[in-house]
Image (cartoon, grey):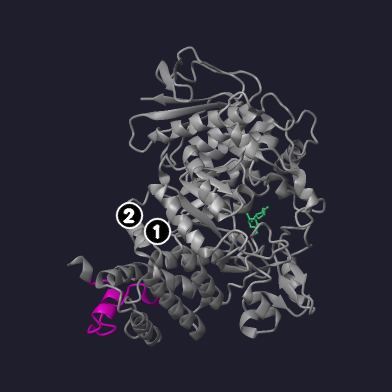
Amino acid sequence: MHLEHRSTGVFALRICRTAVPFGAQRPGREGRRGNTLAVVSPTDERTEATTLPLLHRVSAVRRDTTTDEDWRSLERRLDTEFPRLERLFRDIYGDGPEAVEQLTLLTIDAANSWQDRSADLKAIDSRRAATPDWFQSNRMLGGVCYVDLYAGDLSGIRSRIPYFRELGLTYLHLMPLFLAPAENSDGGYAVSSYRAVNPALGTMAELAALTAELRENGISLVVDFIFNHTSDEHEWARKALAGDPEHEAFYWIFPDREMPDAYEQTVREIFPDDHPGSFVRLDDGRWVWTTFHSFQWDLNYRNPAVFRAMAAEMLFLANQGVDVLRMDAVAFIWKELGTSCENLPQAHWLIQAFNAVCRIAAPSLLFKSEAIVHPDQVVEYIDEKECQLSYNPLQMALIWSSLATRDVRMLSQALDRRHEIAPGTAWVNYVRSHDDIGWTFADEDVAELGINGSEHRRFLNAFFVNRFEGSFARGVPFQDNPRTGDCRISGTTASLAGLEAHDPQAIDRVLLAHSIILSTGGIPLLYLGDEVGQLNDYGYLDVPAHADDSRWVGRPKYPADAYSHRNDPTTDAGAIFTRLRRLIDTRASTTEFAGGRLVPFDAKNDHVLGYQRPGRNGGSAVVVLANFADTAERVAALTLSGLPAVALDLVTGTRLLLSGGLLLAPHQFVWLRVE
Ligand code: GLC
Ligand code: GLC
């Protein structure tokens, strides 16, 4: 009773107990920027004038069918989250009438969306509120695939659920499956409508049914929220092209080159193979901002109507039952003349504002950040109040760097100083994604090791595209830009690790790479098909829409043959799959691997990576030692002298004598439980 009538809540007070006169609250110490709407000075007429109608307008959308309890739960969340949303909105958009109106409409949308949300999803909201660390479990395992390439369509994905269970998946990222241009859609990253599934893949009703079925099987669904841009076929873009001023204001459209030239002074080229610079010319002579492909138009978040429109799309997806949104291309969403237009403060505020909207209307929905940028900037997106999950592009890149150099110092340094992230958040660790591998390590970090960053990048690019004597890798260059020297790498895990080149150590490298993502802490994410050693697919060269985008080499069709041999360890597919399955099982029963805490362990050998996973409850720990060399490597007795004389290696299930030091076979790794 007492809790339900918390006297601090604006919404609870204003909507339930409208008898309390506005302004009866004590003025906030922080004044206008105070942390709740009630905490404003009663003399601040602007806020009073705009707040009161907002509260009335929100309460006016309460439906007859909404129970008191359900409405009160919404009010409680508004009490905690609306002040944050309001502050962010003001910081981004100021407090002019248009901004205030959009905020009001946004809040009304959120209240409606909550009332649309199914009872099942509300039950999940409550369950996850009670177990907020559910995604930190050592049982979490992610997989990612394209619906069409992996299973034909959504019903094909349903039929693969038994396999997902066999593998141990708890998190499935389906690559963009929305309506998109037929010919080239950047693999679905050019969205024409978030309300429709690409008809070749299925329907929105099937997607909603799939989320429920996956959930019954212990699997959360992840889809992309591609909010930096839409396709040029999106209704908003079509209207903008036709000259509708409301929708022109959704994009960055300029009549001539003056502003594009000014912005391009400081903006980096992302897809130079597609078009130079960041703008493309429309048929009518105007210029539109397209960071990625010419058919992906950047949205203009300086317009609060854009924020509100995209928030509505986000809530629509949330109500289909999606558990996690992969926030695509977060770095690019705010533009400011004279800057790189990447990672600007407003980009963070916008994501935080989306986060606040979710907390109000779809409280269990999580965000995963896709920021493939400098590590200092990657972490800035990671926060309970921004993105609770984030790709770990540094660890990914440095796994490959270590395999190429057989030297673990860069990876070890990254684990020491860049692994720890905010409480209540987790890394998504991966060996490779559907995209290129970019060498996003910090030059200043590696300089401390005596390594020159640009030279090392040049080496890695040469090594991974087999332009380096003795390389085992068969990658393909992506966006090779001779003008800037920039280049990235495409390819499947097996091809990059040497399987395509018939290198005898390839399979061991594939396992070693995966052992790192399975043991450092966070959600390991497999690119499905890599667990059976799929090789590069050069067929993309024959598809006109793909031929110029080498990332397609790493996106083969479902490797049916390899999967059929997965339980036969005498085949490459089976050797990888059976060993990986064992690691996955071991991880799932090793609670020390829950959470993200990692303590360095210096193996005192540049080829051997070491770290400890202390677990969350103290007591035991797992010490990991991983040999990245092609030769056997020794960890000295003295180095291990702090550990017990004998320890269980969880990888093989055997007890190892540590007192005499440890000899690791080429690419061998051990997970030592020490009590
Ligand atoms: C992300 C996607 C990539 C896409 C780009 C534009 O980086 O991962 O595949 O090309 O965004 O949407
Ligand atoms: C991403 C990255 C870029 C990457 C590209 C697509 O957002 O920032 O480095 O190569 O999009 O693959």
Q: Where's the C terminus, which quadrant?
A: top left
Q: Residues within 10 Å of mark 2 (few under 14, many from 20)?
A: few
Where residue 149 appears, as percent x and y from the top left, is 64, 49
- Bounds of the magenta segment: 6-32
**Horizontal and vertical percent for residue 88?**
46, 70
Check the picture and name the quadrant holding the N terminus: bottom left
Determine if the magenta segment contains residue 607.
Answer: no
From the viewer's side, name the closer residue of 239 and 522: 239
Q: Residue type at mark 1?
A: Ser
Q: Nearer the viewer, residue 609 or 201?
A: 201
* Residue assigned mark 1: 364
Q: Residue at x 22, y 84 (%)?
A: 19
Examine the structure image and report whether residue 17 is included in the region drawn in magenta.
Answer: yes
Label 2: which secondary element: helix
Q: Which residue is mark 2?
A: 127
Left or right, 643 with reference to 452 = left
User: Could you tell me what secondary structure mostly forms the magenta stretch?
Assistant: loop
**Residue 78 position within the rendered picture, expressed as x and y whole percent measured from the top left:** 35, 70
In the displayed structure, does residue 278 sit left or right of residue 364?
right
Left or right placement of residue 20 versus residue 261 in this view: left
Mark 1 and mark 2 in contact? Answer it, CB < 8 Å: yes
Furthest toward the top, the residue is: 660
- Which image quarter: residue 31? bottom left
633 above or below 205?
A: above
Q: Quadrant of ligand 2?
A: bottom right
Q: Say which residue appears at 61% left-offset and 63% top-offset.
A: 199
Position of residue 119 relative to residue 525, above or below, is below
Q: Amino acid at mark 2?
A: Arg
Does the image show residue 389?
Answer: yes
Q: Position of residue 3 (x, y in %)?
A: 21, 66
